[in-house]
Image: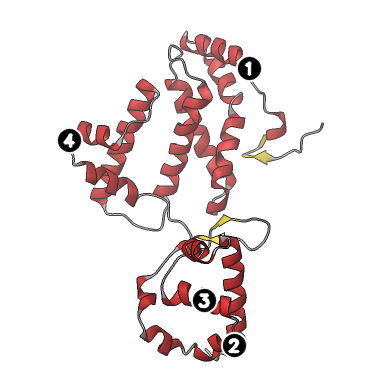
Amino acid sequence: MTRNKVEICGVDTSKLPVLKNEEMRELFRQMQAGDVSAREKLINGNLRLVLSVIQRFNNRGEYVDDLFQVGCIGLMKSIDNFDLSQNVKFSTYAVPMIIGEIRRYLRDNNPIRVSRSLRDIAYKALQVREKIMTETAKEPTAEEIAKILDVPHEDIVFALDAIQDPVSLFEPIYNDGGDPIYVMDQLSDEKNRDTHWIEEIALKEGLRRLNEREKMIIRKRFFQGKTQMEVAEEIGISQAQVSRLEKAAIKQMNKNVQW
């Protein structure tokens, strides 16, 4: 079987080597004994790991070459800090560090600004987290990080949440082969409960021409502010069906209502 040639940062990914576990351990022993060439072999032998990780970030609009280079930094940090005495696979240890490096890069290049104080707390928390993972190969809890930094647990949670990457309302979260379900389809809006919403948009004529099930879905979704999942459970059909019926009803109403 031939592999397709894909070049990232000038690297032909089809020719990247794959190291077996025993080869990896021997190279780590050589590297930790001072062999610089062993480190290079470990890096080259794990570039496929970086490629597999950056696929998770393909929908961010970032250049693949940039993500690959940042991921390689995370890989090198993982190699330099990996402890052979810990009974854990290198990939298990390296993947969170590569992901963390990429997320840090995305945060630093995020157009949405977070206050300096929150960013400081978040970065200190991430540093503590990485230190604990390096030493124990375990993910620390927010409470453990808060205790080390001597700050309230709520501040740690709030700061880490504040620097999370934003999610588009139009990002698909489910697709059964038909119409996709987007993030916005899962949101309810209390403002939609206001009775004047109907009068302002003048939907009565459009609603009158829908069948009973379409009317019920539109009322529950936009007048009562319910999510598609809630509507699906109430009327006994799947969420995908609710999504299709909702879109069809809106399309029909657009034909009959002058917005």
Question: Of 120 and 219, which appears nearest the observer?
Answer: 219
For the residues labelled 4 and 3, the Cα–Cα distance comes to: 53 Å
* Quadrant placement of the N terminus: top right
Horizontal side, residue 71 vs residue 116: left or right: right
Q: Residues within 10 Å of mark 1 (few under 14, many from 20)?
A: few
Label 3–label 1 contact, CB within 8 A: no
Q: Position of residue 35 (x, y in %)?
A: 52, 11
Q: As shown in the figure, which amino acid type bears the numbered disc 1?
A: Lys
Q: Which residue is mark 1?
A: 20
Horizontal side, residue 9 vs residue 95: left or right: right
Q: Looking at the image, is mark 2 or mark 1 earlier in the sequence?
A: 1
Q: Which residue is mark 3?
A: 216
Q: Where 79 sits versus 199, above or below?
A: above
Q: Residue 153, which numbered label?
A: none
Point 49% across, 65% down: residue: 234
Q: As shown in the figure, which amino acid type bears the numbered disc 2?
A: Arg
Q: Looking at the image, is mark 1 or mark 4 earlier in the sequence?
A: 1
Numbered disc in front, either 2 or 1: 2
For the residues labelled 2 and 3, the Cα–Cα distance comes to: 13 Å
Q: Where 91 sits versus 155, above or below?
A: above
Q: Which residue is mark 4?
A: 150
Q: Which residue is mark 2?
A: 209
